[in-house]
Image: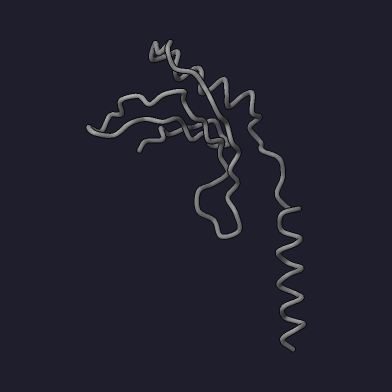
Amino acid sequence: MKPHLLALVLALFAILPVQAGAPTLKAAEAAAIAQGDLDSRAITDVYITEMRFKDAGLFGGDPDHWEVMWSKELPAQTEGRKEIGLKIKMDGSYTRSVR
């Protein structure tokens, strides 16, 4: 019984990554949103250095999103924190990534 259960679990984990689709928000659109955010704040000395697609994963957590990183840290709204980029969801809404 146990080998069958193990085989079933392994098959499930092998199939799940195939079920994940391509991002609904294209990379170019996410980059335009990020650049638009910088432009709206008149930030001209910072640029996008990295973009990475992160899917929700098996156990939920954050929804699918693009993680966009800045070339340098910016002052965040919370004193003592630094903005390092944006987290852009598939609907185009975003939050600032801080550390």
Q: Position of residue 34 (x, y in %)?
A: 51, 23
Q: Eyeballing the image, is 50 above or below 62? A: above
Residue at 52% across / 30% down in the picture? 68
Q: Is residue 47 left or right of residue 56?
A: left
Q: Is residue 76 left or right of residue 10?
A: left
Q: Eyeballing the image, is 33 above or below 55? A: above
Q: Residue furthest bottom?
A: 1
Residue at 41% across / 32% down in the picture? 96
Q: Nearer the viewer, residue 33 or 3?
A: 3
Q: Position of residue 24 (x, y in %)?
A: 66, 36
Query: Considering the image in quadrants, where does the N terminus appear?
Result: bottom right
Query: Considering the image in quadrants, where does the C terminus appear?
Result: top left
Q: How is the image coloured?
A: one colour
Quarter of the figure with residue 21: top right
Q: Position of residue 38 (x, y in %)?
A: 44, 17
Q: Position of residue 59 (x, y in %)?
A: 56, 60
Residue at 76% across / 76% down in the picture? 7
Q: Nearer the viewer, residue 43 or 33?
A: 43
